[in-house]
Amino acid sequence: MPADHRRTSHVLRETVILATMCLGDLLFTSYLLATGHGIEANPVMALAYSRFGPYGFVLVKAALVGIPLVIAETSRPYCESLVIRSLRTAIAAYGLLWFLGTVAINRWV
């Protein structure tokens, strides 16, 4: 193991931030879809919703977010700095893609 290996019992702050962003997106999107006031911008998630309904939508989202986060946390002992940089990149990308999707769907300029 690397010399900088630090055994901790908590999850990274970045993991919590990304999971919270995804959960907020899931709840908000689910509400908008259920009330007929919105559409899903992500084509993969739109397909999941159309094929499997709201419960399948939640399960697919949980898998697509949860599995990579578990892999990231499991990889921490081997290369924590890479995991942190990767999670920070994912946070920025998720936020940017969410913003661009929202702008595109709502035709905001």
Image (cartoon, grey):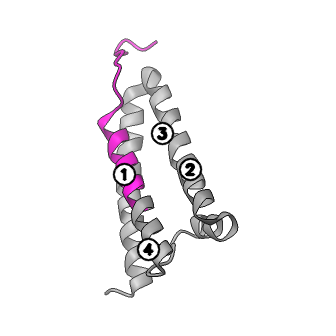
Tell me which numbered mark, 1 or 2, is placed earlier along the sequence: 2
Classed neighbour count for the residue bearing mark 1: other residues with Cα under 10 Å, few (<14), some (14–19), many (≥20): some
Where is mark 2, residue-wise? Answer: 64
Q: Is residue 89 visible?
A: no
Residue 22 is covered by the magenta coloring: yes
For the residues labelled 4 and 3, the Cα–Cα distance comes to 26 Å
For the residues labelled 4 and 2, the Cα–Cα distance comes to 20 Å
Tell me which numbered mark, 4 or 3, is placed earlier along the sequence: 4
| Residue under the image location 43 percent in, 20 percent down | 77
For the residues labelled 3 and 1, the Cα–Cα distance comes to 12 Å
Q: Amino acid at mark 3?
A: Leu
* Looking at the image, residue 53 lies above or below residue 107: above
Residue 19 is covered by the magenta coloring: yes
Left/right placement of residue 16 relative to residue 31 reads left
User: Where is residue 9 drawn, in percent x and y?
Assistant: 35, 20
Q: Amino acid at mark 1?
A: Ile
Tell me which numbered mark, 2 or 3, is placed earlier along the sequence: 2
For the residues labelled 1 and 2, the Cα–Cα distance comes to 14 Å
Where is mark 3, residue-wise? Answer: 69
Tell me which numbered mark, 4 or 2, is placed earlier along the sequence: 4
Where is mark 4, residue-wise? Answer: 32
User: Where is residue 105 drawn, in percent x and y?
Assistant: 44, 82
Q: Amino acid at mark 2?
A: Leu
Q: Which residues are magenta?
A: 1-25
| Residue under the image location 41 percent in, 50 percent down | 90
For the C terminus, the image quarter is bottom left
Tell me which numbered mark, 4 or 1, is placed earlier along the sequence: 4
Left/right placement of residue 52 relative to residue 21 reads right
| Residue under the image location 51 percent in, 48 percent down | 65
